[in-house]
Amino acid sequence: MREKIKNLRFIYIFYFSAVLVLVGTLTIYTLFGETKNYIEEVTQKIYIQDTQDLAYNFAEMIANETGKNIYINLKEDENLREKLEKNLQLFISKRYRYIYVVDKAPKGQNYRFLLDGSKKVEEKSDFGEFYEPLHVTKFQEAYKSAHPVYFTQENAHGVWITFLQPILKDGKTDALLVVDFSMQGHKLIDNSLSELDGVLKISIYVGIFIFIIIVFFSYIDHKRVKVLESFKDKLEMRVRQEVEKNRQKEQQLIEQSRLAQMGEMISMIAHQWRQPLSAISSASASISLKAMLGKLDNETALEISTAISDYAQHLSTTIDDFRNFFKSNKEKQEITYTELIENVLGIIEVSIENKNIKLVKHLHSNKSFYSYPNELKQVLLNLIKNAEDILLEKKVENPTITIETDENILRVRDNAGGIPPDSMHKIFDPYFSTKLDKNGTGLGLYMSKTIIEEHCHGKLLVKNDEEGAVFTIVLDGKKD
Amino acid sequence: MDIEKIEKLTQDSQSLKLLYVEDNQQARESTLSALDIFFQDITIAVDGEDGLNAFRKGNFDIIITDINMPKMNGIDMVYKIREVDEDVTIIVLSAYDDKMYCDEITRAGISGYILKPIDLNKFIDIMVEAVDRILQKKKKA
């Protein structure tokens, strides 16, 4: 679940950054568009302002230098003309291409040159030369209004602004100072800005492209994550199913092992009961026969019926022993190994003897300790049963099971040749069985180990000696 | 139950020599109390080996034996006896568990198989049959 949230967050961050990139680019572009216009406007204004200042100064100067009538004064004073033209000339540059002064010709629409700042002789107009401006209305406007007028024109040399500054005498326009100046510098700025604009436009496309790619990959990633998640879910479900299956299988095996244990118990009861039942049947046969033949005296009848009653008592005790056997203890009890062993042998001894297996006991421990007797009995029974099974399976000569105790140690030995080395490490694994018949569930030793080590906090060990397998129980026997 | 039959059996069997082989004391004692009625001369053996030794020493008309016994089991004992005596009547008295040996022991040559716990009627029938055969053989001889 947490993993899921992480993934989702990751995708949202992706989407968010994609949108951010796009919005950022668009904002920058919009802002830049405005800034570009502003820069253009301002530079143009500065250009014009500069020109206006310059023109105004010139107009002032010329007005001051030329007295009442410009035309007459200049016509008469060639030196003044030359001096003024030189002044104008100083300002001719790539930017200020033409600076000249015209006045209205007395007749018609024409204008005539009064001063010309042009340096080159071929470009220079003579004093009094008539001049017909292209935008004559602007000239008239400037003349009439006595205020500066400018207009833009474009030709092969680029963009030009023609600035018309009236030269005033007593508040009336006497002549016009004309300044042609190039807007090329402005154009350059403009061009750079346009280039920048182009770059921004491209970056918008790139932004959109990146956005699309991010969205695309996010989508793919999202899908992939979804597929992975569904795969994970499926896997988890499979795992759960398998675990459940395993659990059921385990349950089945435990059930099977319980059935096998019960089967063993019934078989043990059968062994225990066979002889007493035979004895009872024989005794009853003998009573019947004697009665039939009229040979039954009181003494014999009493003797035999007492024997029968004893046998019946024995049967009853056996049943009680078995019933107690598989009850599990809730609290620890004080016990000794000898008590445990006698108890277990009471149940299994007949069965072992019937199979002609010799049982040897070396009991040297009289120490009492605290533990769960029924659980320990189960383990002991299991160990002895295992020994019995392997002895029968291998058809060992002089089959012998030896039970030894010493202090807190109990050993069960057999002489069946020992556990094969390759099975040794698996012997306590659940479901591991070497038994050929179906009774081997592979749970006996596993459960024994669990009981001894986890329930009783002791140790269950195995080794081989020269004769066979040796299982060793070590208990600490503490009260808690 | 046919009392006459039992009475006849009791009379017929008295003269016969019985070897009874059984390892379990309880079973032995209670069975003996019934066998006492039929046989006066009973030799007891406590396992197959003991039974075989007793058989070699005495001259028995009938052997009644358990199968599952320590040292030597009933089957092996029967085989060993058959090696030296093909005629002696052998009856097996054993528990259900040993039924699986039934075929094997029949092949070894036995006259009857009585299951424990004892069913009196079957016991009588098998005994009558066996005793009759022994007596007929004795007459012929």
Image (spheres, grey):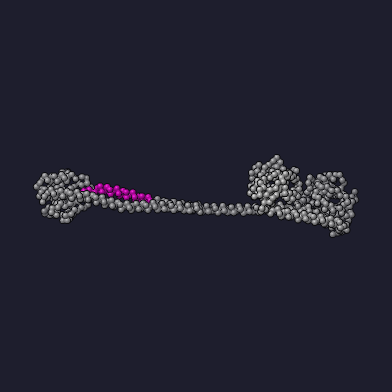
Q: Position of residue B99 (x, y in %)?
A: 77, 52
Examine the rendering and report whether any part of residue B9 can be seen: yes
Indicate the quadrant where residue A289 lies.
bottom right
Q: Is residue A406 above or below residue B32?
A: above
Q: Residue at x 78, y 53 (%)?
A: A276
Residue A198 is a magenta residue: yes
Q: Residue A373 at x, y = what percent? A: 69, 51
Span highlighted in magenta in the image: A180-209
Q: Is residue A33 magenta?
A: no
Front one among A7 and B112: A7
Callout count = 0
**Magenta residues: mostly which secondary structure?**
helix
- The percent position of residue A124, horizontal first and vertical second, equals 15, 45
Observer able to see residue A130 = no
Q: Position of residue B14 (x, y in %)?
A: 89, 52
**Left or right of A72, for residue A403:** right
A176 to the left or right of A233: left
Relative to B128, A465 lies left or right: left
Nearer the observer, B125 or A239: A239
Q: Residue at x 13, y 53 (%)?
A: A169
Q: Residue furthest bottom?
A: B1
Q: Nearer the viewer, residue A431 or A201?
A: A431
The extreme top residue here reads A466
